[in-house]
Amino acid sequence: MSTLQGTLLSFYIVCDEASYDEVTGNWSPSGSHAYYFHNGTNELGTNVVWQGQEYTAFPLQVEGFEVSGNGKMPRPVIRVSNVGQYLSSISRAHNELTGWCVIRKRTFAMFIDAVNFTNGNPNANFVEEFPQDLYYVDRKVEDNKLTLAFELAAASDLQGVQLPAGQIVANYCPAEYNYAGNVGESLKCTYRGALATCDHSLDGTNGCNVHFLNVDGKQVDKPFAGFPGCGLNRA
């Protein structure tokens, strides 16, 4: 693991169940099985510890988390080393991990726990992380002596999954709009600026993209609570 302060690190939790904390906005394992992985080691040459949790150093590659502008949900693929058949044995014992959760955590190296460094880390801060991602294992796409790979999907994109009761609208955000003069109780709308109105769209002239501007050319997360991909047909 590079210890450069600006290095972005990713951590993965593969578990049979996950629960959501509405206060922190974080996911955590809540079932009987959970496996923690990170593609690398710390300055000491041992497993990286993040937020007090040790993540097993394991060769893995993940691609496809990027969100496209066409409204389709991303379907990432996680590819791991299968040398020794360690994950293959876990996969076979649990129905190829179908329906299991994959939680992705991301932070910069400068914030990870002090125990990862020879001389500690005065910048260690367990709350400094990007919004977490939760995906589900949809299917196994590769299994051989060298590599094991799974395709992931969002809950709403899994075949045969019934969403909770409620109206699903493609281009309308049902969250209560917040602004500096009217801070509501919505858990989805985090806007606190001065713009007093919102048309509850994602790309409209007074929508989410207007209220949550990109910073230094980098896209920021937007709490849009609509379902822009629900009106599209899957290929």
Image (tube, rainbow, N blue to C red):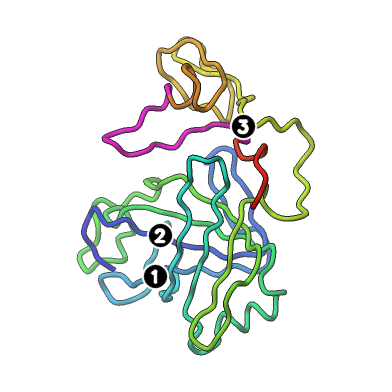
Label 1, residues with CA under 10 Å away: few <14, some 14-19, many ≥20 = some
Q: Secondary structure at mark 2?
A: strand
Compare marks 2 and 1 and give the one earlier in the sequence.
Answer: 2
Q: Where in the figure is residue 193, as x and y percent of width and height? A: 41, 18
Residue 36 magenta-drawn?
no
Q: Look at mark 2 in the image and give the residue it sits on.
A: 10
Residue 226 magenta-drawn?
yes
Kindly indicate whether the residue at mark 1 contacts the one at mark 2 (C-beta within 8 angstroms). yes
Which disc number belongs to residue 177? none
Q: Look at mark 1 in the image and give the residue it sits on.
A: 39
Q: Residue at x 49, y 71 (%)?
A: 79
Q: Secondary structure at mark 1?
A: loop
Q: Which residues are magenta?
A: 210-227
Q: Where in the figure is residue 42, as x and y percent of width and height? A: 30, 70
Q: Is residue 16 above or below residue 178?
A: below
Q: Residue at x 41, y 74 (%)?
A: 57
The kind of residue tagged 3 is Gly
In space, the residues marked 3 and 1 are separated at their CA atoms by: 34 Å
Kindly indicate whether the residue at mark 2 contacts the one at mark 3 (C-beta within 8 angstroms). no
Q: How many marks?
A: 3
Q: Secondary structure at mark 3?
A: loop
Q: Look at mark 3 in the image and give the residue it sits on.
A: 226
Label 3, residues with CA under 10 Å away: few <14, some 14-19, many ≥20 = some
Q: Where in the figure is residue 105, as x and y percent of width and height? A: 45, 55
Name which quarter of the figure residue 46 lies in.
bottom left
Q: Nearer the viewer, mark 3 or mark 1?
A: 3
In space, the residues marked 3 and 2 are separated at their CA atoms by: 27 Å
Q: Residue at x 67, y 39 (%)?
A: 230
Near-viewer residue (3 or 194): 194
